[in-house]
Image: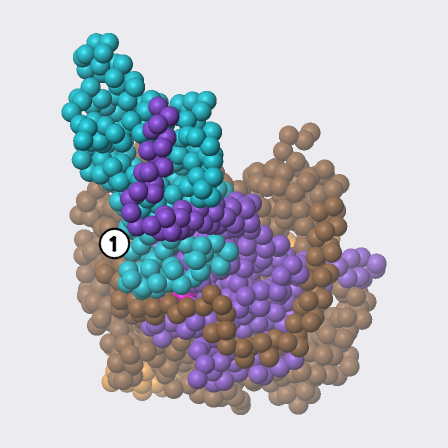
């Protein structure tokens, strides 16, 4: 049909899947580390089962903690590496994610209505990200920062922090839990939309290939395509902002 | 008050006078040396095990008053009177009932 | 509001407690498995340690212990359960023995002083240099001032006997021990009454009077443990102390006696016992001498009279006398240990001995029992030389009527050194004793050291005494040493034998004092005096017990056959009259009071100095020898001045204020502990603080030194230091 | 047979406050300077009337203690990771140092103040009845060293243990120190006397934990639940609308017309 448009470069893709992988490991190991009647999200069987997978009892818990801490460090270092090697892409991403246009909230409300109840009006056009993606990305960025910072406190707690730091550590636990919980709530929708919902198949594919069909782009991210075409007309040169946006297939 | 200090002086004089009553006149330390070199050679091995602690002061006094009667009087003859006094002083001053009994173990 | 809340809480807590009483035993049967969060932990692995026997060296008690050694490092000291003298225990100090071994401030190499005395500038030198120097200095002093120009002082240690042996071989009569700063007055009194120094058999006693002895803090094994046990079995323990010590707190009865009036109390006890004929008349006739004279002597020493002196109600004194007599012979006036209180301490202790005699408790269960012969043989006999140029006796000889010749008197020896008379003493060999921190009037000890040409200190740490020396030699701790056999006495149970084998190799360059003395003997030309090793010495000591060596290795302790109590029945006492001398004929001969004559404590000569300073003990430290211990310093981080709350109020002193304490001897600054636990006329502080040494970081610059404040008085009969004769002034720092 | 129940039976009238147990514990367990796994509390001596209307201090009392290894431990309930738990094998409340993150919840949650954050190990610490020593056949360090045998230790489910025998011998005289605020069913038994009293504290969760358990955890549950519900509904619609790819994209196509 129409030609493909470049949407993600290699570091974006790598970053996405790196992030996803870390989240999987951290989430699973983290779930295994919570063991308290008032906190267990799904009951004590979950941490018990996970701990028994990792050697059983205390040793399993300890192994999970080591894994969790190691994965956390890798995750934070990976993010830092991404910020260093693709600062331009990161800046673009953050600008796109945090720039909310007037029609976005209407889009989100209508989209949610349509997806769940089958009601809702027409969807206003969306940019590089739609509002749903933006909302999840915002939560991921802010939540991720909170998770990383509180995780750092927890990592250092038993290694560096003084005995008087229990207050700080206690609050770090609370915020860590809160941030992960909220991001995880968004993650469910993200995974459904991206991996299960058929309409986003090209989006899912683009997370491997980097490219989306022009059709798809026009339908889902009309404003983005408009901007791309405008740029191309104006200077028919490489776009300065969009990652690979000038490399029209 | 005054009477008391006089009392103390009197007591001190008495003390100095009385030391000679409680203790013999020779040199107990030299006596110990002499006893070890002249008596211990037999007493404790071939003869009866003897130390100051073996007798009370009165017995030592008796023994030394009539030393010619002891079994080893032959050996005693070679000991000068001064040395004998010193040995006596040692044995007497460290006797079983002395103010400073020689320690055993 | 919070206070109100707290009161409410405690009342409610009490109610729930009462409720719990009935339920507790039933609750004990509930299985832990019902707990919701329960899960089984993997069983812990036993530690990979080796267990080696030794004997504690943190005080004089010598409790048997088991060192747990992991990879050559001592990780824990545990009590030796087979060591019954200590009732199988190890106190806080014993546990802190590990901290002593691994103290970073331990002496590591021989040190030669290069700065001024007390300045703390040292040069590390080799052992050969150190030994050559010490030998040549000792030789010089011997040549110039006679052999008696060297003074030897050794603390209570299993190798201290070698120091005396060395002194004798060297040719000096001048040996002082720590004992003349501690217990000799009591020994004097009991030797002069009973002919020996009997031991208390607390275990079997039904009534014990602790006059000044703080036995639940100044731990003596097995007495301290037994006091607790017998109280639980219904025995009565009475404590007389101006201070509410832990012994006072736990005693059946505590009387805050006016300091220095113990003799009045004892004479009143004797008065009641004699007046009411509560004694065993047959025993008194057969075994004691001087009852009539004693009866006349105490005829007017009524409880009412004693109440006026002691502050203890007459009715209580009378009751105690009757109770004591009713419990006799399983009753005692505890002989005490530290007995160096007053200038008439020997006479005070004589009054203790006399009351014991009236109880007919000698060699009876629950009374005072003679030390039993342990059966050790004399090892490595040698012929000490004789030097005709030596003076006739000790430098402190004849300064008091009845000096113990082996121990002497440190205070009087110090006087003689200061005066240079009767002859000069110019050298000092010190092993593991610390007069700079234990002898009253520290200033004088310092001046004494200035008179010396040479001073060498062998110790494990840089004590204040070592800090003043010319040469400091590092010794290993007891746990790193092989030591000869020592006999220990445990009341009615008699003697047991212990020795030490090293549980780890000596740390740093430390050398046992035996090795040092042997090396010096070689250099000074009398190697024959030390021509043996400790293993051989021990074999000779144990010649009577061929099985002992194997048992000591197996159990850490050997119990020689002990004769049962009562063995002295019918035997003469080792006194001139061959009886217990209520009336001391020896004192009569010497012009001393043959019966203890009471004199009220002398009032303070200076109205501003209105507090009597008393010394005492904490169960967590042994005077100055362990206040710098890394573990124990957590229990006693600094010393405070115990000050009665009323007295403090009058002086405007509040809890924790820094106070200035002053006596004619010196002054000190420390924090006040404002407390109801001490009489209004008395103050107390712990020893071992306010040190001078740069090698004692926990105590130098911390608290105040008691020996800076104490005046150097001494017992008029035996020369023992009298440490309760000092009055001090107390004021808040900064106050006019 | 039921599991062990390790407990301490304390005859506090025997305690002379010599601190042997504290020193032994520190040495055996490498407890950092300034912190303690066990204690001896001193009762304020009663004031009695002395001679001549004076006041005199009466009989004193010392109370040794440590973690009471409760059957309903508030510390266990407060631990977010399960690092602190009740050992089913012997009834002790233990800390797994590898799982402790030093949050301090358990410290505030203990009514006896038995827990602290060790300044060097940086995690929660308290008495564990010396498991290594027990494995070597020895008593806990404090019990082994106690000069007056005030502390007695053993499995009170085993009638032959010293502790059980002491309990049995003192039936009706055994008391426990129970916090007014919460009976955690402690396993430390005192013979006859427990003075001083009233020193227990309100077992409290730190605000951060109350907020976590009371607000954050339910909120997260709601958020995840709602989001999950939304996903399920979407999935349901997707499935009901038929397997064909027409449904979703079809709708989208309609929107295309808009442009």
Instruction: Left or right? Give the position of A201 relative to C187.
Output: left
**Can you tell which chain is drawn cyan?**
A
User: In terms of depth relative to the viewer, which is nearer, C4 or C707?
Assistant: C4
Q: Where residue C354 sits in the image (x, y, percent)? A: 64, 74
Instruction: Left or right? Give the position of C703 relative to C558.
Output: right
Residue C209 visible in the current orientation: no
| Residue displayed at 41% across by 26% down | A124
Please give the residue where the numbered disc 1 appears in the rendered image.
Answer: C507
Asked if residue D70 is among those painted magenta in the image, a careful observer would answer no
Where is residue B95, by image quadrant? bottom left
Q: Colour of chain D?
A: purple
Q: Where residue C478 sits in the image (x, y, percent)? A: 32, 61
Magenta stretch: give its range.
D128-132
Q: Quadrant of the C terminus of chain B?
A: bottom left
Q: Colour of chain C?
A: brown
Image height of C6 relative to A151, above or below = below
| Residue displayed at 68% across by 67% down | C16
**Can you tell which chain is drawn orange?**
B
Residue A224 visible in the current orientation: yes
Where is residue C340, by image quadrant? bottom right
């Amino acid at each position: 049909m129409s030609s493909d448009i470049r949407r993600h470069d290699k570091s974006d893709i790598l970053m996405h899947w790196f992030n996803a992988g870390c989240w999987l490991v951290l989430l699973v190991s983290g779930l295994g580390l919570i063991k308290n009647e008032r906190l267990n999200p799904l009951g004590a069987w979950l941490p018990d089962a996970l701990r028994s997978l990792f050697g059983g009892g205390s040793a399993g818990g300890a192994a999970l903690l080591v894994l969790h801490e190691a994965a956390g460090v890798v995750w934070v270092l990976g993010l830092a590496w991404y910020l260093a090697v693709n600062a331009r892409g990161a800046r673009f991403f953050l600008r796109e994610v945090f720039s909310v246009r007037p029609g976005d909230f209407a889009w989100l409300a209508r989209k949610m209505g349509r997806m769940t109840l089958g009601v809702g009006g027409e969807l206003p056009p969306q940019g590089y990200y739609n509002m749903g993606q933006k909302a999840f990305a915002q939560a991921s960025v802010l939540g991720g920062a909170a998770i990383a910072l509180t995780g750092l406190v927890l990592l250092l707690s038993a290694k560096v922090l003084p005995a008087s730091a229990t207050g700080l550590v206690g609050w770090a636990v609370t915020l860590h839990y809160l941030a992960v919980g909220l991001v995880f709530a968004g993650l469910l929708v993200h995974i459904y939309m991206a991996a299960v919902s058929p309409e986003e198949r090209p989006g899912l594919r683009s997370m491997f290939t980097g490219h989306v069909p022009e059709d798809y782009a026009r339908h889902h991210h009309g404003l983005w395509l408009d901007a791309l075409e405008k740029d191309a007309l104006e200077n028919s040169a490489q776009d300065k902002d969009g990652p690979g946006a000038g490399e029209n297939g | 008050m005054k009477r008391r200090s006089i009392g103390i002086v009197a007591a001190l004089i008495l003390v100095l006078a009385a030391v000679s009553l409680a203790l013999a006149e020779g040199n107990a330390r030299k006596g110990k040396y002499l006893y070890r070199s002249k008596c211990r050679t037999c007493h404790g091995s071939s003869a009866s095990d003897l130390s100051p602690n073996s007798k009370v002061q009165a017995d030592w006094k008796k023994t030394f008053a009539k030393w010619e009667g002891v079994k080893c009087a032959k050996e005693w003859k070679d000991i000068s009177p001064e040395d004998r006094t010193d040995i006596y002083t040692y044995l007497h001053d460290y006797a079983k009932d002395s103010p400073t009994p020689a320690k055993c173990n | 509001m919070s206070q109100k809340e707290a009161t409410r809480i405690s009342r409610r807590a009490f109610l729930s407690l009462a409720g719990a009483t009935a339920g507790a035993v039933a609750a004990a049967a509930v299985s832990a498995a019902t707990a919701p969060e329960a899960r089984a932990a993997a069983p812990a692995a036993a530690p990979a340690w080796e267990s080696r026997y030794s004997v504690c060296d943190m005080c004089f008690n010598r409790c048997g212990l088991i060192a747990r050694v992991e990879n050559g490092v001592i990780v824990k000291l545990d009590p030796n359960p087979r060591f019954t003298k200590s009732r199988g225990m190890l106190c806080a100090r014993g546990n802190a023995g590990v901290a002593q071994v691994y103290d970073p401030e331990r002496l590591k190499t021989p040190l030669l002083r290069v700065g001024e005395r007390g300045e703390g500038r040292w040069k590390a030198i080799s052992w050969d240099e150190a030994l050559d120097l010490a030998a040549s200095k000792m030789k010089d002093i011997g040549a110039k001032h006679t052999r008696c120009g060297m003074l030897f002082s050794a603390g209570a240690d299993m190798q201290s006997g070698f120091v005396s042996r060395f002194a004798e071989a060297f040719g000096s009569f001048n040996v002082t021990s720590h004992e003349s700063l501690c217990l000799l007055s009591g020994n004097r009194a009991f030797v002069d009454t009973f002919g020996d120094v009997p031991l208390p058999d607390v275990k079997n006693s039904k009534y014990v009077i602790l006059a000044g002895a703080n036995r639940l803090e100044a731990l003596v094994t097995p007495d301290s443990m037994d006091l607790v046990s017998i109280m639980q079995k219904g025995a009565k323990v009475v404590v007389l102390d101006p201070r509410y010590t832990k012994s006072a707190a736990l005693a059946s009865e505590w009387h805050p006696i006016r300091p220095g009036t113990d003799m009045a109390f004892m004479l009143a006890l004797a008065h009641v016992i004699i007046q009411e004929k509560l004694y065993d008349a047959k025993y008194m006739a057969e075994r004691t001498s001087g009852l009539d004279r004693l009866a006349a002597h105490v005829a007017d020493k009524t409880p009412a009279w004693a109440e006026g002196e002691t502050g203890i109600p007459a009715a209580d004194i009378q009751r105690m006398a009757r109770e004591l007599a009713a419990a006799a012979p399983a009753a005692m006036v505890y002989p005490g240990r530290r007995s160096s209180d007053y200038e008439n301490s020997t006479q005070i202790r004589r009054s203790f001995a006399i009351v014991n005699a009236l109880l007919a408790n000698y060699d009876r269960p629950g009374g005072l029992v003679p030390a039993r012969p342990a059966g050790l043989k004399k090892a490595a006999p040698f012929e000490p030389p004789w030097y005709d140029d030596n003076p006739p006796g000790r430098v402190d000889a004849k300064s008091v009527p009845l000096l113990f010749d082996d121990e002497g008197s440190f205070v009087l020896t110090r006087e003689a050194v200061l005066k240079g008379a009767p002859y000069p003493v110019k050298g000092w060999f010190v092993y593991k004793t610390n007069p700079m921190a234990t002898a009253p009037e520290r200033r004088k000890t310092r001046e004494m050291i200035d008179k010396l040409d040479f001073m060498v200190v062998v110790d494990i740490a840089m004590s204040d005494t070592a800090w003043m020396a010319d040469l400091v030699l590092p010794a290993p701790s007891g746990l790193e040493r092989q030591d000869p056999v020592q006999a220990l006495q445990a009341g009615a149970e008699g003697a047991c034998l212990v020795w030490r084998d090293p549980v780890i190799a000596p740390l740093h360059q430390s050398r046992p004092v035996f090795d040092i003395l042997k090396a010096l003997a070689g250099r000074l030309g009398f190697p024959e005096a030390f021509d043996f090793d400790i293993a051989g010495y021990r074999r000779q000591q144990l010649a009577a017990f061929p099985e002992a060596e194997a048992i000591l290795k197996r159990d850490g302790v050997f119990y020689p056959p002990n004769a049962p109590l009562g063995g002295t029945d019918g035997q003469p006492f080792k006194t001139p009259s061959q009886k217990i001398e209520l009336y001391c004929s020896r004192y009569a001969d010497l012009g001393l009071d043959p019966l203890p004559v009471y004199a009220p404590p002398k009032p303070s000569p200076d109205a501003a100095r209105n507090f009597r300073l008393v010394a005492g003990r904490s169960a967590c430290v042994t005077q100055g020898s362990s206040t710098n211990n890394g573990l124990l310093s957590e229990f006693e981080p600094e010393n405070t001045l115990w000050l009665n709350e009323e007295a403090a109020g009058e002086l405007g002193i509040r809890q924790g204020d820094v106070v200035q304490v002053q006596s004619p001897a010196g002054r000190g600054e420390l924090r006040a502990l404002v407390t109801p636990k001490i009489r209004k006329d008395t103050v107390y502080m712990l020893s071992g603080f306010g040190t001078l040494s740069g090698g004692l970081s926990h105590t130098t610059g911390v608290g105040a030194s008691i020996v800076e404040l104490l005046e150097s008085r001494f017992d008029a009969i035996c020369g023992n230091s009298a440490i309760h004769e000092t009055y001090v002034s107390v004021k808040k720092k900064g106050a006019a | 047979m039921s599991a062990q129940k390790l407990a301490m039976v304390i005859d506090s009238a025997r305690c002379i406050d010599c601190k042997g147990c504290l020193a032994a514990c520190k040495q055996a367990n490498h407890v950092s300077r300034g912190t303690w796994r066990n204690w001896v509390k001193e009762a304020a001596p009663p004031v009695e009337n002395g001679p001549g209307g004076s006041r005199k201090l009466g009989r004193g009392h010392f109370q040794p203690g440590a973690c009471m290894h409760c059957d309903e431990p508030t510390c266990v309930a407060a631990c977010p990771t399960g690092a602190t738990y009740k050992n089913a094998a012997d009834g002790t409340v233990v800390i797994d140092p590898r799982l402790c993150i030093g949050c301090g919840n358990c410290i505030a949650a203990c009514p006896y103040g038995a827990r602290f954050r060790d300044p060097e190990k940086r995690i929660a610490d308290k008495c564990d009845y010396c498991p290594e020593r027990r494995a070597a056949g020895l008593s806990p360090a404090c019990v082994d060293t106690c000069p007056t045998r005030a502390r007695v230790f053993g499995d009170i489910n085993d009638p032959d243990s010293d502790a059980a025998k002491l309990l049995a011998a003192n039936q009706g005289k055994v008391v426990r120190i129970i916090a007014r605020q919460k009976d955690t069913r402690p396993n430390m038994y005192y013979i006859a006397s427990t003075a001083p009293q009233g020193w227990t504290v309100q077992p409290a969760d730190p605000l951060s934990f109350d907020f976590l358990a009371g607000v954050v955890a339910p909120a997260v549950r709601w958020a995840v639940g709602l989001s999950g519900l939304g996903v399920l509904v979407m999935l349901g619609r997707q499935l009901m609308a038929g397997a064909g790819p027409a449904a979703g994209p079809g709708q989208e196509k309609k929107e295309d017309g808009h442009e």
